[in-house]
């Protein structure tokens, strides 16, 4: 899902791109010390796992981020998605796309086939459900990983991601998560100033993202030959076991900014939500609105409100309240109010490029760069909010992280019958 | 909320109140001076009305009399009359009592039923009325009571739409001119530990207020059962009023207004704007929702979170929290404290449902008119605005809602006939009126 800044901003100017690539050109001149990286050639060979819209986007950004990066293998559950992605990438990137027919894989095991190819790094952009198992396989196979947010849909998946991230450190592998807001200039500066005390001690906050019903997303018509499984995967955005629901799938971006500013994850939460508009069967079992109060350390309560409903007042911002002022942030600027008044604007450098450039440079220089645990925590922040809203129960972080047994995986991965689980009902849906 | 007050606390309150009752002669011109007697009329004889009547009668002294009763339905009036005269078990708002027949003088000719029962009661010679019908009727009843020169105890909320709010504010101003006492059933305003904590907040104990939260997350039910054969739509809706927005205002207005009122009290202001969401996941029948979450923005950019839910089996929370630059305050119906630079823990409070009547009758007798009309109208407006924002999905400004909104939920006519149920609101589709 594109964030607002990305949607409303035209493609990066040539100048921005040159600036970004010049910066890392300097870095890439260094001699690679990472044993795992194909030392000497400097070439980084990429495998793309998950060829949807975001996969196409990330592969494009990655290949444009640095010199001498090639796409050599691709995998997706569906052949048609893979082929359309491959065609687009070829058009966009030309010679950088060196994916032969025998390096294209489809089906549930496509990711294993890609990992068996001669690739240095994989981009994991399948739907969120598969992230934990694919990350695990990739790290075990010794690959660097760029993975999109969110990185799991349930606590079992979050624990797996944390374990894989720890393994990555042991193996000297890098992991970057697609939380580009961590690299956008105004937030980097603005949140640093919050950490440096610009608004005093944090005592409150708000995180609000409203609007955008996504009603036109995806195929609306089920084809006669599609099994339940195929229908659900093609409508994954609205199926909780696949997407995690929109609080996880999209709003993890905003919640990640909260965790970043607070330098912490929440201690507990209480949430509510439901679906008032997306009630038709093609919207699966996801909600269309959530409101969660997160309590951070020291009893600081933060409000999150999120919706995906058309025709409502749109908002997308975070706000931090301190003892000495306030910081308003969105995807375009940061405004500090109070005695340390300041404003930070986006420098127009595309953070989606920067995140890949950073990773390629780290790989080449053999530097540690591992965002796995951090994104796992932000993902659990969102998951815990969803769990609280679905069940109506207040939740503690420690319980969700360590004790919850929630695992949304289907009984088996095959194109067959799979009943869509009922929409959660607070007070009735069980807390697992 | 709903924590039963101990017998000891209640007796203490009643004793304190008696002292007041025995005080100097009355000075209010409007009150039947000299006798000390206060003739009370009860308009709305449901559970809360019956409760409020017991508190008015038991809280002060025996010279407070129930003089007349009015309700839409005779059966409801009779249940209330029998309970008041014979006694009843206690419930959330009151202790067990043995019957108050010696303070009741309600002959058949002062029992009124129907849509215009309130007008007849206002002409029956009462000094003070208790307005405890469902919220829809409050604005009209309050206006009529003030015009008739009566002191008023009225339950929250005091309206269900901005049109009703404007009526209440106008009537509250008229009451001020007339020197009439008006107390609202926002009993936290009469509860000692609330008073002590809020006073300290106003005196700077937690520094400048920068954030706050208020909640009424509790249980709730659905409209069950079919309309009985032969009963009109209107009667069915009035008898099951809670589930119909035009009568109840939805639970954010009907119930959560208590907590929202504390926000306005602590911040000494009403919000400037709000943004809300909500829906109904569990509740069936009627057209009210079962959960709301609203961000209210107060002056100086202070944002306040309000959450309310009526769904069984969820984690409950009914409280308020006010965050300042030097600490924070937590309050609920039983307890409270201030943490930070100026720690404070207040003593417990006597039964606030009694205290509000003690305060009202004292005010009537001393001719020092309490007037909570505008205050409760603003808190009610606050909740209505949150509901309107959630129903429509639109951010709202206070000034617009207060002055320009034309929302009026009144049905085409008050008669026991056909009345289709308005659809359950859908954000992004339900128009902002």
Image (cartoon, coloured by chain):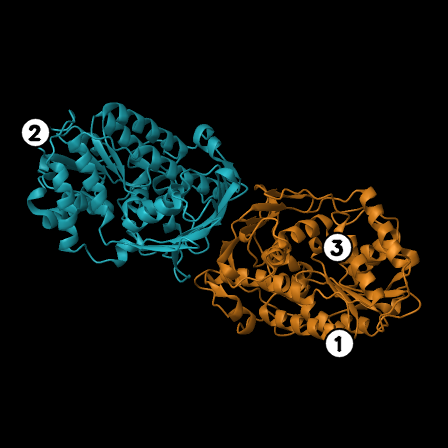
Q: Chain under label 2?
A: A
Distance of label 2 from label 1 (alpha carbons)? 94 Å
- Residue A155 lies left or right of residue B17; in this view the side is left
Q: Position of residue A139 (x, y in %)?
A: 24, 27
Q: Position of residue B26 (x, y in %)?
A: 88, 67
On the question of residue B79 being in view, the answer is no
Number of other residues with Cα within 10 Å of mark 1, as a class: few under 14, some 14 to 19, many 20 or more:
some
Which chain shows up in orange? B
* Quarter of the figure with residue B185: bottom right
Number of other residues with Cα within 10 Å of mark 3, as a class: few under 14, some 14 to 19, many 20 or more:
some
The mark nearer the N terminus, 3 or 1, is 3
Q: Which residue is mark 1?
A: B147
Chain A, hue in figure: cyan
Q: Nearer the viewer, residue B251 or A413?
A: B251
Q: Chain under label 3?
A: B
Q: Chain under label 1?
A: B
């Amino acid at each position: 899902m594109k964030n607002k800044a990305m949607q409303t901003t035209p493609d990066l100017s040539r100048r921005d791109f040159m600036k970004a690539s010049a910066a890392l050109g300097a870095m890439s001149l260094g001699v690679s010390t990472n044993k795992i990286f194909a030392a000497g050639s400097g070439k980084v060979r990429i495998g793309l796992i998950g060829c949807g819209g975001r996969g196409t986007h990330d592969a494009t950004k990655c290949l444009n981020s640095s010199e001498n990066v090639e796409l050599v293998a691709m995998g997706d559950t569906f052949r048609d998605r893979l082929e359309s992605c491959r065609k687009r990438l070829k058009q966009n990137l030309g010679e950088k796309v060196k994916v032969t027919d025998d390096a294209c894989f489809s089906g549930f095991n496509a990711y294993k086939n890609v990992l068996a190819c001669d690739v240095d790094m994989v981009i994991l952009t399948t739907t969120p459900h598969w992230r934990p198992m694919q990350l695990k396989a990739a790290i075990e196979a010794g690959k660097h990983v760029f993975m999109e947010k969110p990185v799991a849909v349930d606590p079992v998946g979050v624990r797996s991601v944390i374990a894989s991230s720890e393994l990555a450190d042991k193996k000297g592998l890098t992991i970057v998560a697609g939380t580009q807001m961590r690299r956008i200039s105004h937030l980097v500066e603005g949140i640093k100033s919050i950490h440096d005390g610009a608004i005093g001690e944090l005592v409150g906050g708000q995180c609000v993202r409203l609007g955008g019903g996504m009603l036109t997303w995806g195929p609306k018509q089920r084809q006669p030959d599609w099994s339940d499984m195929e229908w659900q995967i093609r409508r994954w955005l609205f199926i909780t076991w696949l997407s995690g629901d929109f609080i996880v799938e999209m709003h993890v971006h905003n919640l990640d900014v909260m965790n970043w500013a607070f330098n912490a994850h929440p201690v507990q939460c209480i949430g509510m939500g439901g679906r008032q508009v997306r009630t038709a069967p093609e919207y699966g079992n996801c909600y269309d609105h959530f409101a969660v109060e997160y309590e951070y350390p020291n009893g600081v309560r933060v409000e999150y409100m999120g919706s995906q409903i058309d025709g409502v007042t749109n908002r997308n911002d975070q706000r931090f309240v301190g003892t000495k002022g306030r910081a308003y942030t969105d995807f375009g600027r940061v405004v500090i109010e109070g005695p340390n008044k300041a404003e930070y604007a986006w420098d127009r450098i595309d953070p989606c490029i920067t995140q890949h450039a950073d990773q390629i440079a780290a790989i080449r220089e053999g530097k540690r760069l591992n965002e796995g645990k951090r994104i796992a925590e932000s993902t659990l922040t969102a998951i815990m909010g969803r769990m609280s809203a679905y069940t109506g129960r207040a939740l503690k972080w420690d319980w969700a992280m360590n004790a919850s047994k929630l695992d949304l995986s289907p009984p088996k991965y095959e194109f067959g019958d799979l009943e869509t689980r009922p929409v959660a009902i607070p007070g009735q849906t069980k807390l697992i | 909320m709903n924590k039963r007050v101990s017998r000891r606390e209640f007796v203490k309150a009643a004793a304190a109140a008696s002292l007041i009752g025995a005080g100097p002669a009355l000075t209010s011109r409007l009150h039947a001076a000299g006798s000390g007697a206060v003739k009370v009329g009860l308009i709305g004889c449901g559970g809360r009305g019956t409760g409020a009547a017991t508190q008015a009668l038991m809280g002060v002294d025996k010279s407070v009399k129930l003089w007349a009763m009015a309700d839409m339905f005779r059966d409801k009036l009779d249940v209330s009359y029998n309970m008041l005269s014979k006694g009843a078990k206690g419930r959330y708002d009151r202790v067990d009592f043995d019957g108050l027949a010696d303070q009741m003088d309600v002959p058949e000719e002062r029992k009124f039923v129907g849509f215009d029962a309130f007008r007849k009661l206002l002409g029956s010679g009462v000094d003070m009325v208790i307005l405890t019908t469902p919220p829809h009727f409050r604005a009209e009843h309050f206006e009529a009571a003030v015009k008739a020169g009566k002191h008023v105890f009225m339950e929250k909320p005091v309206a269900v739409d901005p049109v009703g709010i404007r009526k209440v504010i106008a009537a509250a101003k008229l009451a001020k001119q007339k020197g009439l006492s008006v107390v609202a059933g926002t009993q936290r305003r009469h509860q000692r530990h609330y008073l002590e904590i809020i006073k300290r907040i106003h005196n700077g104990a937690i520094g400048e207020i920068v954030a706050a939260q208020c909640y009424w997350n509790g249980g709730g039910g659905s409209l069950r059962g079919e309309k009985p054969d032969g009963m009109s739509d209107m009667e069915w809706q009035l008898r099951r009023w809670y589930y119909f927005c035009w009568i109840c205002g939805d639970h954010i207005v009907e119930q959560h207004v208590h907590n929202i009122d504390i926000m306005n009290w602590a911040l000494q202001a009403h919000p400037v704007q709000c943004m809300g969401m909500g829906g109904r996941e569990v509740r069936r029948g009627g057209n009210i929702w079962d959960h709301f979450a609203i961000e209210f923005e107060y002056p100086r950019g202070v944002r306040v979170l309000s959450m309310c839910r009526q769904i069984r089996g969820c984690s409950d929370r009914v409280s308020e929290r006010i965050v300042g630059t030097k600490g924070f305050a937590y309050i609920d119906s039983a307890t409270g404290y201030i943490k930070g630079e100026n720690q404070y823990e207040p003593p417990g409070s006597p039964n606030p449902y009694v205290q509000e009547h003690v305060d009202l009758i004292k005010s009537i007798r001393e001719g020092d008119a309490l007037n909570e009309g505008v205050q409760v109208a603003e808190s009610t407006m606050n909740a209505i605005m949150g509901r309107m924002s959630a129903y429509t999905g639109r951010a709202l400004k206070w000034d617009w809602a207060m002055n320009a909104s034309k929302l009026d939920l009144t049905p085409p006519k008050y008669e026991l006939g056909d009345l289709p149920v308005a659809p359950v609101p859908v954000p992004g589709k339900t128009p902002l009126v």
